[in-house]
Amino acid sequence: MQGPTKVITVSRKSILRQIIGNLGAVIRTEGIVKLDQSRRIAWLTIEIPAQNSTEGVTTECFHGSPCMCDYDAEENVSEVAIAHFISQKNIHVNDVNYAAFHETYSQLRHYISWCHILHTRFQLLRMEKNGLFNAHINLLKRLGLICASYGDILPLRPFAPTMHPPASSVGRVMYIGPNPPETRHEKLGRELFNVLQEYSPIGNPIIN
């Protein structure tokens, strides 16, 4: 059986020196500022040569976070500088973990790409759903208005208007004929009423 994992820490300061050497950059100034008896902050400035014909020589200044000793302060500011080179200068540290990192990063980009595709598809489907729902509601409204306008020959009456009508009342009418209906007009009225009730967001058709 394997024992507990041992974490081997590689000096960030030495890694930063290797990155600087490969870029042809130079550390111009560096130092440590004591904040009090126990805390101190390290800082350094790095002169970076032009990477292409459109750029000039640049100087970057980095400050670390408060640490309890000089070594930790220097490691901290070195990590800040390394993070800057990785994010801004397209630098990758090819250590023993680089292959696993590169594979993980490639998979991450693949999944992010799929997330964008699925998100776009979801937005399109939601727009399509909203369009179909609105068309459905408009159809119910129109059918309800038709039923209400033929109240002189059909046993249907619109619901009395309210101050704040619920969404489920869209196009709703009342069936005021006998149950079961007797004449063909009454049967037509109840069929239309049932259609409105069945296809409304909330509805209960009349069942014998």
Image (cartoon, rainbow, N blue to C red):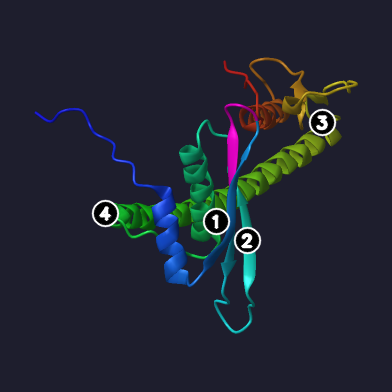
Q: Is any atom of residue 44 visible in this view?
A: no
- Residue at 47 percent across and 64 percent down: it is 20
**Circle 1 — which element?**
helix
- The type of residue carrying mark 2 is Glu
User: Which of 49 and 96 lies nearest the eye of the viewer?
Assistant: 49
Q: Which residues are magenta?
A: 36-44
Q: Earlier in the sequence, mark 3 or mark 1?
A: 1
Q: Bin the neighbour count of mark 4 within 10 Å (Cα to Cα): few under 14, some 14-19, many 20 and up.
A: few
Q: Using the rendered view, name the quadrant where residue 208 is placed.
A: top right
- The type of residue carrying mark 4 is Val
x, y percentage for residue 28? 58, 63
Residue where numbered disc 1 is placed: 84
Q: Are marks 1 and 2 in contact (CB under 8 Å)?
A: yes
The stretch drawn in magenta includes residue 41? yes
**Circle 4 — which element?**
loop
Q: Using the rendered view, name the quadrant where residue 144 is placed.
A: top right
Residue situated furthest front in the rendering:
37
